[in-house]
Image (cartoon, helix red, strand yellow):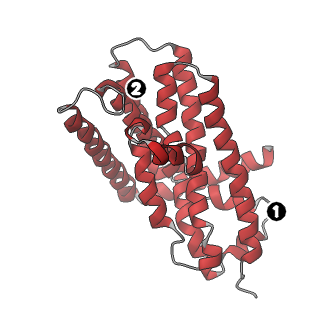
Amino acid sequence: MVRYLRLYLCFVRFSFTKALQFRLDFFFRVAMDAVWYAVNLGFFGVLYAHTSLLGGWTESQAFVFAAGVFLADALHMTVFANNMWWLPIFVNRGDLDYHLVRPVSSLFFLSTRDFAANSLLNVVLAAGILAVTLGRYPDPLPAERVVLYLALLLAGVLIQYSLHLLFLIPVFWTHSAHGLRELYYAFERFAGRPHGVYGGLLRRILVSILPFSLIASYPTRALFEGFSPSLVLHVVGVAAASLVVVSIAWRLGLRAYASASS
């Protein structure tokens, strides 16, 4: 465990060194995400100009939810997203060989090697938006609820990572240029809306089979409703199960991998 932590810290140091060499890209990413945040907050603002409730949530609650979406996305972009982008390329070019021979878990190495230091400021920005929306929330929120919310939000980030990777692993068999990345992006949009706006079969799918609603919506629900053993166990259980499924799918993919030397 200590060896993996030291290795990850090396990834982080190298990423900061690289990011400082391309400062324009650093500020471009910040500006791009700032616009995305503003557009999404404006979207909810327009909706609540015509209704008082959306999926059972007030405007203040929806803004807290949106800030949680921003923070989860910023963490995913900083820690995992660059690595997800390169995975199909490595598989198709045979470059995966260079990573499989390293004396560490190939899944860990390929998932974390590229820490996006140029996205780290977006984490700070998203956290700031979350702090403002929590501060402006009209009712008092106990500290233990906020702690629970943040813990479940981190579990949501793991779920998002697992879902993203599961949509890419089929590249071992399809050899497509991007795996099922575009399909993942289509489903990811469901994570940006409160789970209460969905109903019936779609809602059950989004909280179990393709649990995009667990990324930010269920943590926000726990923040407003308080501790619920069933809700907490559901989010944590799905996060753990998704990591197990990813591990199994990864091993199956490696068995089907045709390396550059084959």
Q: Is residue 72 above or below residue 118?
A: above
The residues tagged by marks 1 and 2 sit, at their Cα atoms, a distance apart of 41 Å
User: How many other residues sit within 10 Å of disc 2, few (<14), some (14-19) or many (≥20)?
Assistant: some
Identify the residue at image location x=43%, y=33%: 127
Quadrant of the drawing holding the C terminus: bottom right
Q: Is residue 131 visible?
A: yes
- Where does residue 47 sit, x and y in percent of width and height? 23, 37
Q: Amino acid at mark 2?
A: Ala
Residue bearing mark 2? 131
* Residue 182 appears left or right of 37: right
Identify the residue at image location x=53%, y=52%: 16
- Residue nearer the viewer, 231 or 89: 231
Q: Amino acid at mark 1?
A: Pro
- Where does residue 246 sit, x and y in percent of width and height? 68, 56
Residue bearing mark 1? 103
Q: Secondary structure at mark 1?
A: loop
Q: Secondary structure at mark 2?
A: helix
